[in-house]
Image: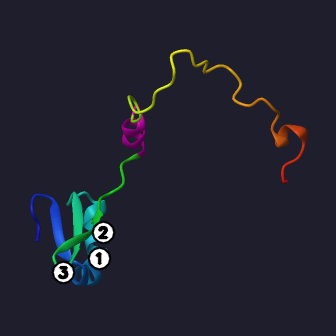
Amino acid sequence: MDGGGEIKISATEFKAKCLGLLDRLKAKKIKRIIVTKRGKAVAVLTPPADRKNAADDLFGCLRGRMMAPKDFDFTAPALDEPLNAMKGRIHE
């Protein structure tokens, strides 16, 4: 069941042992849990990243995935007309 910090477990067995497994995951005694049904993975559980690492992982994640024309002015207003909220109307 335990393979280098990774556990592969059937859904039935997971249902019976989930609280203990989640405690082990939280304590970082295991890296991830793969829940299977009929031998096929249906879910993968991993502990959440701590806040600092989560922010570090997001920084630059879209680099190279978006392109703007060379003459695009990022400082120009995006709208030609004022927003409804600026006119004092919140709902329309």
Does residue 18 lie above or below 55 as drawn? below
Q: Three-letter amino acid code at disc 2?
A: Leu
Q: Which residue has dot 3 on it?
A: 38
Q: Is residue 58 magenta?
A: yes
Q: Amino acid at mark 1?
A: Cys
Which of the 4 image quarters holds residue 4? bottom left
Q: Position of residue 62 (x, y in %)?
A: 41, 34
Residue 26: x %, y % from top left: 31, 61
Q: Which residue is mark 1?
A: 18
Say which of marks 3 and 1 sits in front.
Answer: 3
- Is 44 left, or right, of 83 in this rendering? left
First to last magenta residue range:
51-60
Residue with the mark numbered 2: 22
Q: Amino acid at mark 3?
A: Arg
Image-quadrant location for residue 58: top left
Residue at 56% of width from left, 15% of height from top?
71
Q: Position of residue 59 (x, y in %)?
A: 41, 33
In the image shown, does 70 or 34 lie closer to the viewer? 70
Horizontal side of 3 relative to 32 (left or right) equals left
Q: Quadrant of residue 48?
A: bottom left
Dot 2 falls on a residue whose secondary structure is helix
